Amino acid sequence: MKHIIFDCDGVLIDTEIVAAEVTVDWLSSEKVNISVEEFIIQHTGKTFTNIINQLKAEGHLKASLKTEAIVPLLDEQIKAKVRPILGISNLLTQVSIPKSVVSNSAAHYVTEALEKIEASHHFENRVFSAEMVAQAKPSPLVYLLAIDRIQIPREEIIVVEDSFTGVQAALAAGLTTIGFLGGSHIQPGHGEKLKQLGVFDLAHSHEELARKVKLMIKQ
């Protein structure tokens, strides 16, 4: 293995739980009742645009709501609360192969998050966002873009994803994928569901992930 691709939210930064809390609060103000746990199960890994448009299409939100105006407001609230997942700094230092980020979040959001957790130098501007392609995850397009840009054969790439949506995208792109279970949003049984999707392995922390990745690099 010669390259590792990380998802951002829920893998590098512990924002999925924050995103769920912020969005559930906003949905409540729009008379949509959903718990944080239900939101995590139903929507983790999706873009805010897709979530809002889906809820509008299902009749839960007013069709007149301006999705493009709401998304930046949610992003700003979440960015203010961003924090690294425990152990990520050590992992990025210990794993010596080149690294990229592939995310459904906006590129500027990912870039600012990496700067906030002092991890930008590990990725050398290799940030690939769903806004760069026609369809977000679970479509594989953003992963296919990354493969094309980094010019590494897909069989030499490891992906780390935490969500069903992200795992589906990575696997559809033909990439070896590890399911990461170290985020605070992970629910019981999530790992088994990722295994059913076809992940190569699971990691419950960045310490465990570092051990497994280093073994894969040596093989």
Image (cartoon, grey):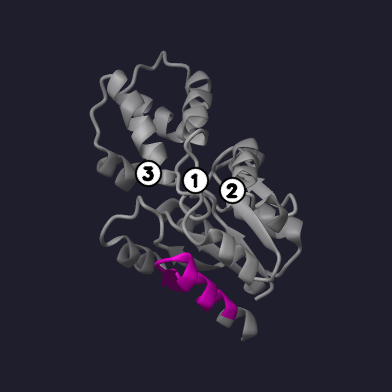
* Residue 210 included in the magenta stretch of the image: yes
Q: Secondary structure at mark 2?
A: loop
Q: Which residue is mark 2?
A: 117
CB contact under 8 Å: marks 3 and 1: no
Magenta segment, which residues?
199-214
For residue 218, above or below residue 9: below
* 90 and 64: which is toward the camera: 90
Q: Which residue is mark 3?
A: 17
* 205 and 98: which is toward the camera: 205
Task: Determine the image quadrant of residue 183.
Answer: bottom left
Q: CA distance from mark 1 to mark 2?
A: 7 Å
CB contact under 8 Å: marks 1 and 2: yes
Which amino acid, by three-letter code, is at mark 3?
Ile
Q: CA distance from mark 3 to mark 1?
A: 11 Å
In front: label 3 or label 1: 1
In this view, the residue farthest toward the top is: 64
Which amino acid, by three-letter code, is at mark 1?
Arg
Q: Secondary structure at mark 3?
A: helix
